[in-house]
Amino acid sequence: MPSVSANILVLYDAHGPQIRPLALALAEGASRIPGVSVTIRHIQEAEQADFTASDAIVLGSPNWSGVTGFMKTWLDDRGDLWEEGSLAGKVGAAFTTGRGRHSGLEFTLLSLIHWLLANGMVVVGLPWNERMKVSGSYYGATAAGSVTEDDLEQARALGQRVAKIALSLKISKGHGITRS
């Protein structure tokens, strides 16, 4: 059987100082899986081709009472991807940062996940683990206040999970199992 590879896009808005370390940790985790390549882009650097060339997309936005206005506008301007169905069946996940644990982190994750679902993507979260008692959410990777090693480990775990599932979907597709 030929080797299978997957391309992961980590796309984030850096209008918050803590978001980039999580983006890098996500990429690090995904890169640990053989056959996976990762592209990290700030929304100002991203192009439409980055989306269509990816097998998985992980969106990140700092929490500003939800996603940043910059991220919301950028995602809204990608309506043609939705109309064309370009992202349907691809893997999606989300990450966020905020000032405190109860400042709307899960709302921000759910807003990003909503966009992924609207595009027909297969959304990946994190299953429960002990680290979540101090860091993280099953909806995606988070950091509240300063980014801790626990936060970075949650992001790495999400990156690995996204990469494994993206590869599994590609392998399934290669064996006659198609996405619907």
Image (cartoon, grey):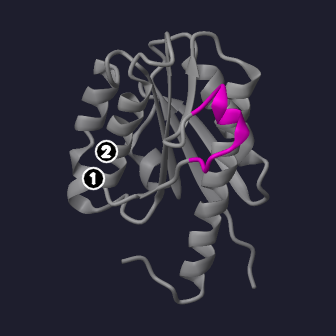
> Which amino acid type is shown beneath numbered disc 1?
Ala
**Is residue 129 within the magenta segment?**
yes
Identify the residue at horizontal 36%, vertical 63% (top origin).
88
User: Residue shown at 64%/65% (left/top)?
Assistant: 167
Residue 54 is at least partly visible in this image: no
- Pinpoint residue 151: horizontal percent, then vertical percent: 67, 26
Q: Is residue 85 visible?
A: yes
Measured as percent of width and height from the top left, residue 5 is found at 68, 64
Image mark count? 2
Labelled pair 2, 1 in contact (Cβ < 8 Å):
yes
Q: Which residue is mark 1?
A: 118
Residue at 65% across, 53% down: 161
Q: Position of residue 109 (x, y in %)?
A: 42, 35
In the picture of the structure, the residue carrying the numbered disc 2 is 115
Q: Is residue 43 above or below residue 103?
A: below
Task: Check disc 1: other Cα within 10 Å, few if <14, some if 14-19, many if 20+.
Answer: few
What are the residue bounds of the magenta stretch?
Answer: 126-136
Q: Secondary structure at mark 1?
A: helix
Q: Please tell me whether residue 74 is drawn above or below residue 56 in the rendered image.
A: above
Q: Quadrant of residue 52?
A: bottom left
